[in-house]
Amino acid sequence: MPFNPIALVGRHADARVAECMLTLVQHLQARGIQVLADGAVVQSLARPGLQPADEKEIVARARLVIAIGGDGTLLYAARLVAEHGIPLLGVNRGRLGFLTDVSPENMLERLDEVLAGRFTEDPRTLLEATVARPSGPEASLTALNDVVLQKWATGRMLDFETWIDGRYVNSHGGDGLVVATATGSTAYALSCGGPIVQPDVGVLVMAPICPHTLSDRPIIVPAGSSVEVRLMQRHETRAQVVCDGVLLGELEPGDKLLIAPSTHRVMLLHPPGYDYYRLLRSKLHWGRGSADAPPGPASLPER
């Protein structure tokens, strides 16, 4: 069986997550699959045969990672496996769950389909964000959803410039900027007025946060673009850079935020029947209360 061992990640302090984890461990062990988890999870679940493993051991041994929780849990798992080519499967125990699309009600059935080789591979683009300083070391992080420049510990707006592939784009005033992948278009960028982008479309969304000028609107650029953000000098300017909710560092006037495609990708696995538009209908409550597609048009009666 190709997916052996399998690692589980999730916030086990959440009773719902812990319940799903225990069910998955029992199900996988009954099929002769080794199951790995963080030491705290192993201690909490107290399931015989569940093997403790730190992050290094998980990425060295696991052939599949199952993230149980919300999209934040899957984003953590994505950072964990990004450089190692380990596929991810998400079980939704969060709120929206755009990335964790397997429901707890049918997770065992869906998991068995994946174990039997019936699944869809869904490669997702990552971004590499780097804070470059005139003096001192650079700091870098990857992001599956977005890289966010935001004001920090001050009520004053930020002034910053954007450049794409070395070409000047605009000078902005506002609370910051979201640079999102197509995957992240349904996250922070959406609340900033950005569009919903199908995940396999090769674009980036650049969405200003609370822009001072109403004409400063979100734009879409090719996914291979290199984005540069320069913070301009302003009294009491303080800004920080966050990648998928994880702090990269502070950005000061004179520093540069460089955002470019990562050389790595994350492979999500979906059971048979995955439909992105059905997911949108379900999570965003589109249509008339049902996530299912309506029946085709009825035939007209004969005259």
Image: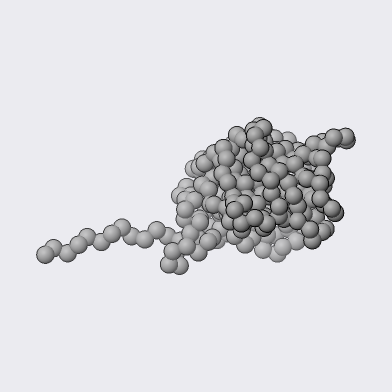
Residue 178: x, y in percent?
Answer: 66, 49
Picture layout, residue 17 above or below residue 143: below
Tell me which residue sits at (36%, 61%) in the image.
Answer: 294
Residue that lies at the very extreme toward the right in this rendered image: 136
Decide if residue 241 is on the left or right side of residue 195. right
Instruction: Please provide percent x and percent y for residue 145.
Output: 64, 47
From the viewer's perspective, tell me whether residue 118 is left or right of residue 217: left
Tell which of 53 and 30 is nearer to you. 53
Q: Where is residue 68 drawn, in percent x and y?
A: 65, 54
Judged from this view, the residue extending furthest toward the bottom is 289
Quadrant for the N terminus, please: top right
**Nearer to us in this view, 4 or 31:** 4
Q: Position of residue 185 (x, y in %)?
A: 58, 50
Residue 190 occupies which quadrant of the picture?
bottom right
Query: Given the current orientation, which residue lies at the most extreme left position?
Result: 303
Tell me the quadrant of the picture where the C terminus can be found. Answer: bottom left
Is residue 60 visible in this depiction of the protein? yes
